[in-house]
Image (cartoon, grey):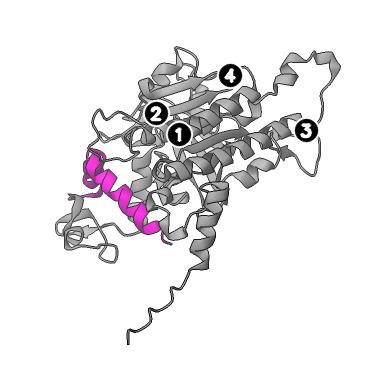
Amino acid sequence: MAKKAAPKILDPLAIFKATAEKRWGKSLIIASDIPTKLLGRISTGNFALDIATFGGLPRGRISRFWGTPRSTKTGSCLNTVTQFQKLCCFCFQMKCKCKGRRPAGVLWADLENKLADDLMIPWMEGHGIDTNSLLLERPDSGDEVIDVLDMAIRQGIGLVVVDSLAHMVPRAEIEKPVEDGELPGRMAKLVNKAMRKWIVALSQRGFEDAEKVPTVLLINQIRGTLSQYVPETLPGGKGQEFATSLDVRFHSSKSKWRFRSVKADGSWTDLKKSDVAGSKKEDATPDYQEVDYRVTTSSCCPSGRSGTYRYWLKNVYGRRKGDPDNIASLWNYAKRYEVFTKAKGGYALKVPEEWARTDEEKALVLCEGRVTDDVMANFRANPEAQQILWDLFVRELCKQ
């Protein structure tokens, strides 16, 4: 007598997924099917920010840079664009075999009309940006920005930058005479509408092509209020705080004025302000400014990390304009975490044994020299060693 076949056990989750997709379309995804590429990061081009944000901006999300005036918000976005353009425009990967490989495209909504100037082209190119792959949008109103960016996200533009939310003026406010007054909350409604629309576009784009979900980067400015209890506010309402996955606040702390170069490797000593004030021939334009940053809100990494970095304003001492001085930050971290150690006959930069994963990493010596200055000079002239140390710190410190 033939044995009866065992009854099929139906998975309620699979049945519900199939039924829902027939009725409402593809809107469900199993968590294990999410590609790991979505969990990646876009480097900011700033070592200090990469450490604070656990590798950079989260892919497929909305991030926001905000802070005080002249705090390098736009410059940090330009450095992020430079790093993103190193990827392929077809697959968003660093190393690929795509035919006709070109830099990844970026859309920049220039609401402040800041980059639309021939004098700004050398500044962008100084940051390493390929201007042929950067599309500038100069909209007439904030309503147009919402529609343009919605279309860019749905068509797969890899990175979209909005500079800035504080200048997203509603069309009704532009067309309306000034003497008619202003309706309260109009700008906040516009920004909240933009957040809702862009999030839906990102979600739908993720279901169509999950490996190439665009990333949105917003810039906002601090405004003062008349209240003594809440002296500062961000234009656009509080809806943006709930929509963003990463918020970084920037604050320009102080500027350094002039330096006296004392060594051939580019090191220097600060001049006193009295020396600058007493000499009328000296140029008092700052060479760099020190910027304080803090991760205020984040749903993709622990928030609260903060620090300081230098943002150069001149092409002097081997630095370019807009350089966040990553070499100095890498060197300080190397001394703090004992990557810079004593070796036979001098000093060396070597991967710690507890961080090394392979025998090659254990035996890898990045730079060495008889004295500290020799190691620093060799490290400054070795971009490969700098990139290896950058990746090592991002890999190990982002676990803590």
Q: Tag 3's secondary structure?
A: loop
Compute the Cα span from label 1 to label 3. Answer: 29 Å
Q: What is the three-letter code of the residue carrying label 1?
A: Leu
Judge the density around disc 3: few (<14), some (14-19), many (≥20) Cα neighbours within 10 Å: few
Q: Which residue is mark 4?
A: 139
Q: Residue furthest bottom?
A: 1
Drawn side of residue 346 relative to residue 223, left or right: left
Q: Quadrant of the C terminus?
A: bottom left
Which quadrant of the figure has residue 132? top left
Residue 300 location, x and y as percent?
51, 53
Residue 191 location, x and y as percent?
67, 34
Pointers 1 and 3 in contact (C-beta within 8 Å): no
Q: Residue at x 61, y 36 (%)?
A: 197
Judge the density around disc 1: few (<14), some (14-19), many (≥20) Cα neighbours within 10 Å: many
Q: Quadrant of the N terminus?
A: bottom left
Pointers 2 and 1 in contact (C-beta within 8 Å): yes
Compute the Cα span from label 2 to label 3. Answer: 34 Å
Q: Tag 4's secondary structure?
A: loop
Q: Is residue 302 visible?
A: no
Q: Which residue is mark 3?
A: 185
